[in-house]
Image (cartoon, grey):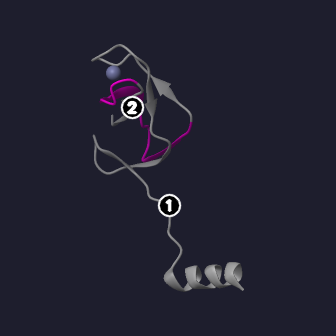
Amino acid sequence: MPMVSAICDNCKSSFSSGISIEGSKITLSGNTAGPCPKCGDIGRITEGTFNVIDNNIAKKVKKNNPSVADCNVFLKSILC
Ligand SMILES: [Zn+2]
């Protein structure tokens, strides 16, 4: 089962949060995990949506960027 990694607040090392992904997708927000195996502090789980690539890798899904055309329209609406 793929595990989502957490980043330690104190030493910034990453470790397994103990949260496993069931299915192929999970959305996380505001979760903490710990203790950090190096310093014992509490870690933070990266917020976002994760997709399971294979059986043990969970990759964060990037938000869809607006297309260049959409971006130009957006910028014009601000500037004009
Ligand atoms: Zn640490």
Q: Which mark is residue 6?
A: 2
Give me the C-alpha separation between circle 1 and circle 2: 20 Å
Tell which of 31 and 26 is nearer to you: 31
View quadrant of ligand 1: top left
Magenta-drawn segment: 10-29
Tell which of 25 and 32 is nearer to you: 32
State the residue at coordinates (50%, 61%).
63
- Badge 1 is on which residue? 63
State the residue at coordinates (28%, 48%).
54
Q: Which mark is residue 74?
A: none
State the residue at coordinates (42%, 26%).
9
Dot 2: what SS?
strand
Tell which of 30 and 76 is nearer to you: 76
Q: Position of residue 60 (x, y in %)?
A: 40, 50
Q: Position of residue 11 (x, y in %)?
A: 33, 25
Residue type at mark 2: give it.
Ala
State the residue at coordinates (28%, 43%).
55
